[in-house]
Image (spheres, rainbow, N blue to C red):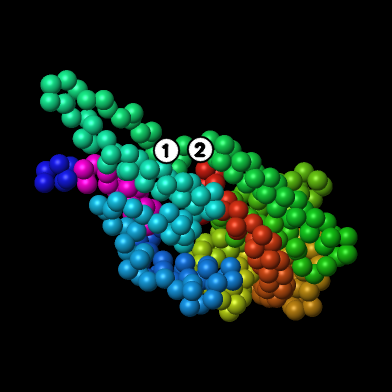
Amino acid sequence: MTSELERTQTSSQPLDRLVEDLQRLRNTAGDVSYAEIAALIARTREAHGTTPAAARIARSSVFDAFRTGRRRINAVLVEEIVRALGEDDVAAALWRKRCLDAQFSARRSAGSVGMDRPDASGGPAESAAPHPPVAPLTSHPDSRTLTVTLTVALLVGCVGVNLFGDGVVDKFHLPVWLDMIGTATAAIALGPWHGALVGVLTNLLGGLQGNPETLPFAPVNVVGALVWGYGYRLFRRNRGALRFLLLNVAVAVACTLVAVPINVLVYNGVAGHASDLVASTIGAIGAIGEGLWVAVFSANLMLSLLDKLIAGYIALLLARFLLPLGLSRSPGLGRK
């Protein structure tokens, strides 16, 4: 009886450690309910072509994966669970491998319990070779290096998209800005502070390229990135077309509230953009006063709504290709 109990406890230890780590991941992701995890898994399966009936998974099956004292565990289900909790494909594959390694270690431990006891002559019996420890998910330098490299490359690309959009506006004198498409893309696909970094670099490089008037507007790019990034994640489990539309409107309003004081106090309402002409048709711009503030605010908000809708939807399209890379938790570069 005692021997069987010891055998069970020993054989379940590697899987218990894995389940405890899985539970910690669930808590870190916001203590997501088992029913919600099951719904997210079913939704992902359907997105990959599985019929709704076949994609459905019971809440009890998900709950069972978080139960300690197991002798076996479904590695494929664990892989789906960690994806539902926000992990990328690389991390999910590592979790699956860890499940297989833990099960192999558990089986070896179960078969070696009796072999570790001394034999009848009092001498030690032949002991099984110690099983290799399961490597933690953070001990894969090659994956981390690749992720950081891709993230840096995407940040540079997003800055390039911003500068290209700004150049198009200057060339054709368009009544929009188009200098935040890359900011929005980075904020959605990588994280809000990645987007903020893209925004600051855009204004800095724009100033160095002969447009010094863009430098004071760096806070506008930062605010837009934070609203896009955090807003997108706020509704990540309940997204919809209307919510994304309202998110872009919120970005437009936030950017206007930051841009107008800069425009009026630093440039007296004339920042050298096509929006200046729009402002002049809304109200008199003769002197600094209430008329100037109202005119600049109205013109900026009107054009900002158009600009942020364009930037937001283009960014969402671009982010569709970047989100599967799972770079929003890039080590060393901030988290979403």
* Tag 1: amino acid: Ala
Q: In the image, which disc is placed on residue 135?
A: 1
Query: Would residue 85 be visible to someone looking at this image?
Result: no
Residue 109 lies in magenta, yes or no? no
Q: Residue 286 versus residue 178: which sits nearer the camera?
A: 178
Q: Secondary structure at mark 1?
A: loop
Q: Earlier in the sequence, mark 1 or mark 2?
A: 1
Look at 75% across and 55% down and name the residue there: 161
Q: Residues within 10 Å of mark 2 (few under 14, many from 20)?
A: few
Q: Residue 160 versus residue 20: which sits nearer the camera?
A: 20
Q: Position of residue 80 (x, y in %)?
A: 47, 60
Q: Secondary structure at mark 2?
A: loop
- Which region shows up in magenta? 7-27
Look at 33% across and 30% down and name the residue there: 130
Q: From this view, report whether residue 183 is shown above or below residue 109.
A: below
Residues under numbered marks 1 and 2 in contact, where contact means CB atoms less than 8 Å apart: yes
Q: Residues within 10 Å of mark 1 (few under 14, many from 20)?
A: few
Farthest-out residue, front: 120
- Tell whether 122 sits left or right of 106: left
Residue 20 lies in magenta, yes or no? yes
Find residue 312 and report its image quarter.
bottom right
Q: From this view, report whether residue 57 is shown above or below residue 182.
A: below
Q: Residue 170 versus residue 298: which sits nearer the camera?
A: 170
Look at 69% across and 61% down and name the residue there: 318
Per the image, the residue denoted by label 2 is 140
Q: Position of residue 251 (x, y in %)?
A: 60, 68
Find residue 153 and report its image quarter.
top right
Query: Would residue 76 be visible to someone looking at this image?
Result: yes
* Tag 2: amino acid: His
